[in-house]
Amino acid sequence: KAIKVQYYNNPMWPGEAHSLKVEKILYQGKSPYQEVLVFESSTYGKVLVLDGIVQLTDKDECAYQEMITHLPLCSIPSPKKVLVIGGGDGGVLREISRHNSVESIDICEIDQLVIDICKDFFPHLSVGFEDPRVQLHVGDAVEFLRNAPEGTYDAIIVDSSDPIGPAQELVEKPFFETIARALRPGGVLCNQAESMWLHTHLIQDMLSICRETFKGSVRYAWTSVPTYPSGVIGFLLCAKEGPPVNFLTPINPIEEVEGATKAGREIRFYNSEMHRAAFVLPTFAKRELEAY
Ligand SMILES: NCCCN[C@H]1CC[C@H](N)CC1
């Protein structure tokens, strides 16, 4: 039987739906924040679904986790203190831990159930929690950032679900202001920024807010994730005013990071050419996004 991860009635993706054939339901439950579903698909491995929206699959999670992590971390010379907002599956943590310059990794995830489920069903993602540099904070990111000392982080990665439900406030100006405050001068933010095919108005709003808030370079990048609506997802790269950051060419190329490729945990998607390519936009997107 096929599970239609229904989007028809979801205002984010009106008029479209995606189907994956279900071999076996592995977990179904509800946290105080969202419904959680894990199933074995026929062709994408295991799939994590939150409130009916595909979050990741074994087959293509590498594209998202690697790009959202290495686009910012390879854009600054030597990232030391990193913060992850969301990311409870552990995949971004796994990717950050490839950087030997990193000394501490804070993660603020609101939903303990997501962390627990991913430890059971997605060990190749939750392995990220095993890194001794990781400090887990279960709670609301806005609260966490309010208490973070000013100018703490070299990089902040917002690995959020979509801005409907618990992640709604993660695309609003006050949130970006707390991020900017927590970054050191020249520090960088990378957040999930939806699809250029479907959400250019939301992206334009975020670009305007970020240009005002960070005052350093702000760029939109994108990558291919077959199981996300429209098959692509974007990222917003923002640099806080201070030492200039050029996102387009990795100053800290992953190929030169000692030990980045760990035996048994190879990088499957990201490389320095994919980094450069991610910022190359089709004409309609240049027109709609670069003016902002
Ligand atoms: N770390 C898992 C990915 C979470 N990111 C989102 C999943 C849902 C998508 N529509 C947008 C990205």
Image (cartoon, helix red, strand yellow):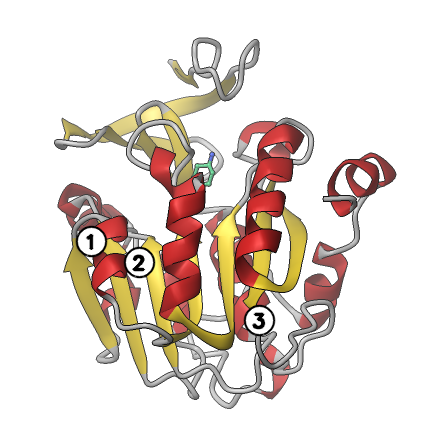
Q: Visible in this render: residue 257?
A: yes
Q: Visible in this render: residue 47?
A: no
Q: Amino acid at mark 2?
A: Gly
Q: Position of residue 97 (x, y in %)?
A: 38, 75
The residue indicated by pointer 2 is: 90
Q: Secondary structure at mark 1?
A: helix
The residue indicated by pointer 3 is: 241
Ligand 1 quarter of the rendering: top left
The residue indicated by pointer 1 is: 119
- Vertically, is 116 above or below 184? above
Which residue is located at x 37 percent, y 72 percent? 82
Q: Amino acid at mark 1?
A: Lys
Which residue is located at x 20 percent, y 53 percent? 119
Q: Left of 29 or right of it: where is 291?
A: right
Of the two numbered discs 3 and 1 on the same chain, state the one appearing first in sequence: 1
Q: Position of residue 217 (x, y in %)?
A: 66, 64
- Which image quadrant for residue 5? top left
Q: Left of 159 or right of it: where is 245?
A: right
- Which image quadrant for residue 250? bottom right
